[in-house]
Amino acid sequence: MLYNCQNKRTKQFLRGLLAILRKLRSNPDKELRLLLLGLDNAGKTTILRYLANEDITQITPTQGFNIKSIHSEGFKLNIWDIGGARKIRPYWRNYFENTDVLIYVIDSADINRLEETGQELSELLIEDKLYKVPLLIYANKQDMVQSITTADIAESLGLHKIKDRDWQIQACVANKGTGRFRVGLQEYHEKVNSLTLNTRYKDVFKNISEI
Amino acid sequence: MFHYIWSLINWYLRPFIKWVLRQTTHMCELQRICYGKPSGAPRTYAVEYSLRLSRNADIISLISYLDDIANQCAITIRSERGILEEAIRTVLITKKINPAAHPDFSKIFGKCVELIWGYRQLCVECEELRQIQYDSGNPVHEDLLLRLWDLLMPYDPLDARITKQWQGIGFQGDDPKTDFRGMGLLGLENLVYFAQEYPSAATHVLTHSMHPRYGYAFAIVGINLTSMALRLLKDGSAKTHIYNSSKTLPSLRAFHQFYCYLFYEFDGFWLESKPNNIMEFSSIQKKFEINIRMALANPSTVFRINLSVDNI
């Protein structure tokens, strides 16, 4: 039941993404290259797996990269998810070539590293190979208590200063929540999770379908 | 289509073949397996297959009883004997086997039951441990994490709980807590077991991970290998190894040892592959998994850590 819902919602999610793509490219190709970047633990792999309709409960830190191709409404989306650990970041540049959309994922609850993520993003924006590539920012983990709003993130990263490309910032909750819903009893835990999962996804997709 | 026809033939023909064999050998299928197949995986696989195909009501209810017990992780050292005796008695009665004439059967069959449902229980135990998120507010979790450091870096104490030093053993940032993610406590326990039980192998692997050219993130690779080990366990591929290596009821220790083998072997495989950089991890990991799966497809496979640690 839940799986079906996810299917439907994933389509919605993709439709939102495709709406951006259409808007951004007057004459879109049928095959698009999306590059997912961001600090470690931002939620890049979760978003990738979620879009591919795969299990998102057993994510491990990405050593290297993951790639998935998703077919949707006549498009073939090749999504590249590159690990965000500090040691891997120097390799990001190897994946810039021919990128159609840059998706930058931010952990909205990781306030301590907001400056670091802003620094990485601004370095990406001055790369020649990413010149004029549209930017979609996911402000992930909006369900966490300590998370900050998209407006605050846009403000602190100085997004309004970006003039050379189209950009969007989008609130989202890509994973099924960590820590907050942990309850000792396993059954109760699962119930709580499936409930919050449903209601939270509704909110997320309300946001996303508004793009 | 072929599969469908085959299962149809099997369904009608199997009882007939079994009847003929029973008349000629004066033994039931389980006895023929227990006496004929070599011990370990080949025999246990065959017993499992035979039991799962059984259409006898008593055997079916015995299987669902054992499944329930395993799912509740209720097979313990204390309860095990009673459970096995119950299973053996049911089969002796249903199959009209005279235990006095076949004294070995009970022992051999009991061993198979222990392995089959012990494995099932092990899957549940690992999954439960995986679902426990690492919690930095829990002193047990914290102690385990700090123990991992002490075991791997005994001469280099931590300056603080949150420090860059963690990156030295291959965590992504200054606080390892987020790196356990989808593998939860299982990932941490695997690493601690490796460092504790095979200190020379773990140090050897850790040193390789710091290689200037072929280095990788030790802890992160370890967590990804936990994910692989769990995948092999849950889809049943690891049965070959667990059935062949377990002398008693398979426990978490068996999973840890399986993991240690994978980590040690992966390290060798990685160096042999001479990767250009860490970005080749996923492709090399996939190749490694294919090799392991191929090895496990051979029913006589049993993995043992080869501790002849060479000098780098």
Image (cartoon, rainbow, N blue to C red):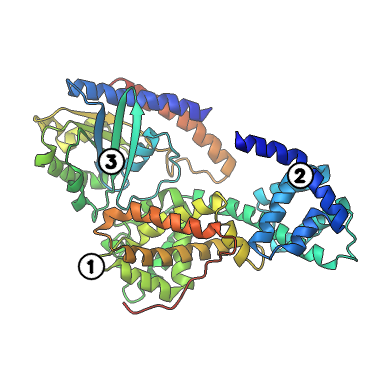
The amino acid marked with disc number 1 is Pro
Measured in 3D between alpha carbons, the distance from the residue under mark 1 to the one under mark 3, in whole angstroms, is 27 Å
* Residue at x 25% of width, y 42% of height: A37
Residue B252 visible to the viewer: no
Helix, strand or loop status at disc 2: helix
The amino acid marked with disc number 2 is Arg
The residue that disc 3 covers is A80
Measured in 3D between alpha carbons, the distance from the residue under mark 1 to the one under mark 2, in whole angstroms, is 60 Å
Front one among B279 and B134: B279
Q: Chain of mark 1?
A: B
Q: Earlier in the sequence, mark 1 or mark 2?
A: 2
Q: Which mark lies nearer to you, 1 or 2?
A: 2
Q: Is residue B128 left or right of residue B7?
A: left
Residue B123 placement (x, y as % from top left): 58, 52
Residue B290 placement (x, y as % from top left): 44, 54
The residue that disc 2 covers is B14
Residue B254 placement (x, y as % from top left): 57, 63
* Residue at x 71% of width, y 62% of height: B37
Q: Decide: few, some or many residues near mark 2? Use Cα within 10 Å; few <14, some 14-19, many ≥20.
A: some
Image disc number at residue B212: 1
Helix, strand or loop status at disc 1: loop
Q: Which mark lies nearer to you, 3 or 2?
A: 2
Q: Is residue A176 left or right of residue B216?
A: right
The amino acid marked with disc number 3 is Trp
- Tell me whether marks 1 and 2 sit on the same chain: yes
